[in-house]
Image: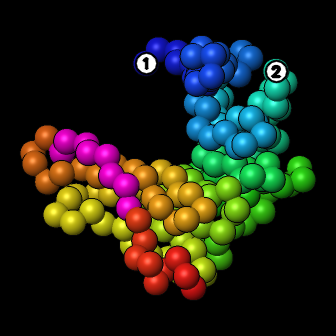
Amino acid sequence: MGDYTGFMYDKNSQTFTQVTYPGSGTTYPTSINNAGTIAGYFTSSGVFSQGFELVGSTYRRLPALNFANVYVWGIKGDGTLIGYAQRHGVYDFFFDQGKYHQLFPSNSAQVWGVNRAGTAFVGPGYLYQNGTFQVLQFPGGGATYAYDVNNAGEVVGLFLDTSVNQQQHCFTWTPPTSATTK
């Protein structure tokens, strides 16, 4: 597998800016907040995946967790990073003020997206908000993967169809009106 780099697209200037953690083989920028802070993870040859954030032109590596790969998937409006670390299982976290904190008591959910308010989280086949996990399964589809959620509770992601080739299809999901008024 070759090296990969990420990018940021500025719609006003219609330009692409390369996002590459210094010295990494692969960089995955996965989220950006309204302040322009980019968050994600990178890998280097023979090194576990590690989280990073990019503020302006300055890259900051999250402290390494010696036992785990660290995957940063989201950033709240206040700059708190959300993701999971993986070794012999999956451990969700949020990274705030220089420390890792557990997000869910179960230690079993991969967190792939967070709304900017930090009140709703998504991952493979779930939405978590108001203290409740909700299964997300696209009707008639196979595996469903939620990648992000906004402050209105709208979710985006993809699902695999049930064909032999398991083709990927994108989806958006809007919660019922009663779910957003709680």
Magenta stretch, residue numbers: 166-173
Q: Nearer the viewer, residue 36 or 7?
A: 36
Classify 51 as above or below 126.
above
Q: Quadrant of residue 66?
A: top right
Classify 32 as above or below 93.
above
Q: What residue lies at 57% left-to-right and 85% top-to-bottom?
A: 182
> What kind of residue is marked 1?
Met
Q: Secondary structure at mark 2?
A: loop
Q: Nearer the viewer, residue 103 or 38?
A: 38
Q: Secondary structure at mark 1?
A: loop
* Magenta portion: prevailing SS class: strand
The residues bearing labels 1 and 2 have C-alpha atoms spaced at a distance of: 28 Å
Residue 149 vs residue 96: left or right? left
> What kind of residue is marked 2?
Ser
Q: What residue lies at 70% left-to-right and 43% top-to-bottom?
A: 33
Residue at which label 2 appears: 57
Which circle, 1 or 2, is nearer the viewer? Answer: 2
Q: Quadrant of residue 106?
A: bottom right
Q: Residue 139's mark?
A: none
Query: What x and y, as percent, mark residue 17?
Result: 64, 16
